[in-house]
Image (cartoon, rainbow, N blue to C red):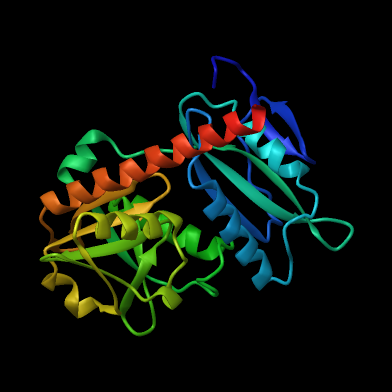
Amino acid sequence: MNGDLTIPTLLQGRIALAPTPYSAPQNAIAYEVIRVERGCPLFLQEHLGRLSQSLAVTGQRLPGDNGWLSGLLGLCAYEPFTRNVRVDAVPNANGGVDLQAGFIASSYPTRAMYRYGVTCALLHAERQNPQAKIWQANIRQAADALLEETSAYEALLVDRHNCITEGSRSNIIFLSGKTITTPPAEAVLPGITLAKVESAAKQIGLAWRRAPIALGELGSFEACAITGTSPGVLPMARLGNIEYAISPALEELRLAYQRLCTESMQAFRQLGKERNS
């Protein structure tokens, strides 16, 4: 980053420089991963809102002192390109939580992946509380093992009812005609990217439908994509032995989502100008 050998990390409200990438604490009770583009954290308000909701599930709340927010913004300002920052809520000695954050190792799809799509695999696993972004090591480890075994890009979770819920680090959408179908809100993490993709879909005239997606229905859809902080809208070419088309509608959706990202960056910069004026 910036050609330096040190990487900034936010600890105790202050930015420190470390020689290695940020390592997530084992005792974090909730976390967020935010995409930073040229110093601008995308959809920051939405991410912090979800972090607050995740903490509420555990009986906690964000720290009352907003000094950590200034520290987080200062941390993001270190990154001139594109990278993800992880924000962790960790228990403190006073019974509340402290926030710490740092840039994590991130990988982004190649142009070829966006053009030709990626392969995904199925993993029979369920999150304990899908409404909260809480680290579950067992699912992460199982997904990593499956991806290594199959060389797939992402693992899609299948619940006890044999329905697709979400990816191990993404949400999932299916396209049929002019309709996008995605699993019910109560069954998945309320993805920030997914919500923005829904807005983008409506802007370009696609209908949005929430419904359970059984394994037996997977072959009935024309196209499919995963959504997330790093991939944005990434088309899927194959899921197991099912092949999907690389739909022009999904490319139009991806570009509409990118416009929302640009608007988020512009709004963040404008807010910074207003604060400094």
Percent across and percent down for residue 126 are 45, 74
Percent across and percent down for residue 194 are 37, 59
Nearest the eye: 53 or 152: 53
Residue at 36 percent across and 50 percent down: it is 148
Residue at 43 percent across and 48 percent down: it is 229
Percent across and percent down for residue 191 are 44, 60
The N terminus is located in which quarter? top right
Percent across and percent down for residue 143 are 42, 59
Nearest the eye: 55 or 106: 55
Left or right of 248? Residue 52 is: right
Whether residue 66 is visible to the viewer of this picture, yes or no, is yes
With respect to residue 219, does 117 lie above or below?
above
Left or right of 77? Residue 167 is: left
Residue at 49 percent across and 59 percent down: it is 140
With respect to residue 114, does 48 lie above or below?
below
Whether residue 118 is visible to the viewer of this picture, yes or no, is no
